[in-house]
Image: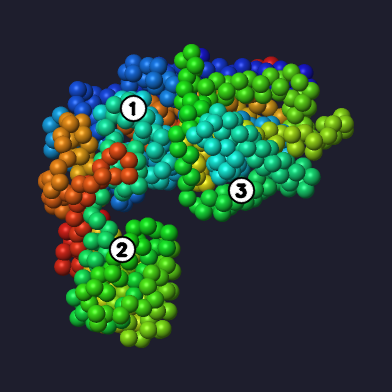
Amino acid sequence: MLKGLLVGNVVVDRQLNFLVSVNVLVLVAAVAIAGTSFVNVYNLQSMAVQIPELGLLGIGVALAMIAGNGGIDLSGIAVANLSGIVAALLVPMWVSADDSPLIFAFVFGGVCLCIGIVCGLINGLLISRAGLTPIIATLGTSMAYSGISVVVSNGSGIRLGYIEPLDDFGHMAVLGVPICFALFIAIAAAIGVALRFTPFGVRLYLLGSNAKAARYAGFSQSGLQLVTYTISGILASIAGLIIAARISSVKWDYGTSYVLIAILIAVMAGVRPSGGYGRIVCVVLSTTALQMLSSMFNFLDISNFFRDFAWGLLLLAFLQISRIDLRSRLFGKS
Amino acid sequence: MATMKKLAVCALLLGSVFTIGTALAAGNKTIVTVVKLAGETWFTRMDQGVKDYGVKTAGVTTSEIGPGKADAAQQERLIEDLIARGVDAIAVVPFDPPMLEGVLKRAMDRGIKVMTHEANNLKNTQVDMEAFDNAAFGAHFNDQLADCMGKSGTWTSFVGSLGSLTHVQWADASAANAAKKYPDMKLVSAKNESFNDANTAYNKAKELLKKFPDLKGIEGGSAVDVIGIGRAVEEAGLVGKICVYGIGMPNDTSRYLKSGAVNGISLWDPKDAGFVMNKIAHMLVDGTEFKEGMDLGVPGYNNMHVKQGPGKGIIVTGQAWIDVNKDNLDKYNF
């Protein structure tokens, strides 16, 4: 156990170091090649604003993976779109956006969160109570949620128009930091702390690394899973709120490519797909690395296919580096 | 140590790739064309026109980019990065026009010129360019069909789906044209839905041929309808007895054009559209006025019609369809 933890910690540090160095490297390369306009305030803010929606989905996937039992959440973007669409349809019936925009924005956010909780609970119940495999359950609910989105919105996009508080939430910066990015960092920090220092976090890691031992230790496996998938659903609905605020419209098929990118982010952050290990700070760093890399390529007019290629390369490089290191450590110590 | 070495090699490699890119862009006005999907035949052809404009015109650098996956979110991110990069003008073929309202507004707020193509419902654009008037295009199909049918007989039409705005506009304009000009032509079972699938069009066409043995003319709506209809006509041994016209891509339809199962297809050339889009963007950068009847220097775009769009911008319309049949097929290799 002690040795396991030791090795685990070594891996943790290498993970973090690697991600930090990748971030720095990409930033330096981008400035060297694309010029200093890459680090001007506008571009830094523009990148920061693009990060939260992917980052939140990435954290959701990471949490599901940490919980073990083949955990994954494929329904993230479907939940995000569904919450945005339901809120965009319902809220204008209750509150006038012209008369009381602030109330509108808050009710909008509230409705998004409610949908997120409901969707997350359904995922959690299917997995923990009905005992479905997470990948199948969330694939199914993802299709179901998208289906509902299509039906209620008739398959077309819904325009929100210009609603000042929402637009500010999507774009405005306070002290140079975009509000939605600050929110993302706050959420990530809260979850990171919860995983590290609360009983919930400790139990989640233990459940992920050894479900049988966790059961004999006497804590409720299904309860933990239920909470985890509900949190993932809430995170997705916050992503939905941010999307709606950022582009002031919602549509059922927005971000269909995010499903795989969110998984890529989690895996690149070193979250173990079989469960029991993963750090939120690494998830954040892996999101920023991907964002900077893709913005850099766009600055240089480089094909998007090359970006996918570079992401793949980065993932492979990471897997390779961490693996070699682990092996030499193990052989060196024992 | 080994890690550092590897990273250094990676950085060197990446660096050498990118220096080539930046060397090219210096001092010129930058116009970037953002398409729906990179790598698709249509947009690969458009890229030729985009590049062509940059080569033939002094003082501008043109390029085409597009998301690797058909997803509004990816397209939105591309434009977000272009704004941060501070290009002079953006020309967009929106994947889903309403989803881009917010980001295009921000582009214009930052002083970037914005022009769009195939988005006459978009508010936040300065100029939207349409290759032709949809009603005139529909009437043009009908005139061709009438000539071939000897101005009398039973005919029918196809659309991709009843939700495809342009398809329905073409079919309705065709019907109106026939009702006005050709009293002996009888429209039966109009607007059959092919769901943009050649096989569905084939099955529908077979049914129609059975149901209406005196059918003399069929009009395709989506780009693949004529392929299915052509196959049905060939199998029924009715080549030369039934007139088939519709929108289509030359290479996809060439087999049926050569056999005579399809009499002719009409389309607009994406290469010309790409060229003209960049010309318009360049005019916006230079502050040139858009006048009714202006000549943009490409056949079909010699007499542009200017009208007010749904927002502050204008819509300019050309007469840029081309008719392709077995005699001039060789000229259009796309």
Horizontal arrangement in the rendering, residue A320 relative to residue B62 (left or right): right
- Residue A117 percent location from the top left of the image: 68, 37
CB contact under 8 Å: marks 2 and 1: no
Q: Is residue B175 above or below residue B304?
A: below
Sequence-first tag of 2 and 1: 1
Secondary element type, mark 3: helix
CB contact under 8 Å: marks 3 and 2: no
Mark 3 Cα-neighbour bin, 10 Å: few <14, some 14–19, many ≥20: many
The structure residue drawn at horizontal position 77% and vertical position 46%, both measured from the top left corner, is: A131
Q: Nearer the viewer, residue B237 or B111?
A: B111
The structure residue drawn at horizontal position 33% and vertical position 27%, both measured from the top left corner, is: B109
- Residue A249 percent location from the top left of the image: 47, 40
The quadrant holding residue B111 is top left
Give the chain of mark 2. Answer: B
Q: Name the mark nearer the viewer: 3 or 1.
A: 1
Whether residue A201 is visible here, answered yes or no, is yes
Q: Which residue is mark 1?
A: B109
Q: Which residue is mark 3?
A: A145
- Quadrant for the C terminus of chain B in the image: bottom left
Q: Name the mark nearer the viewer: 3 or 2.
A: 2
Give the amino acid at mark 2: Trp
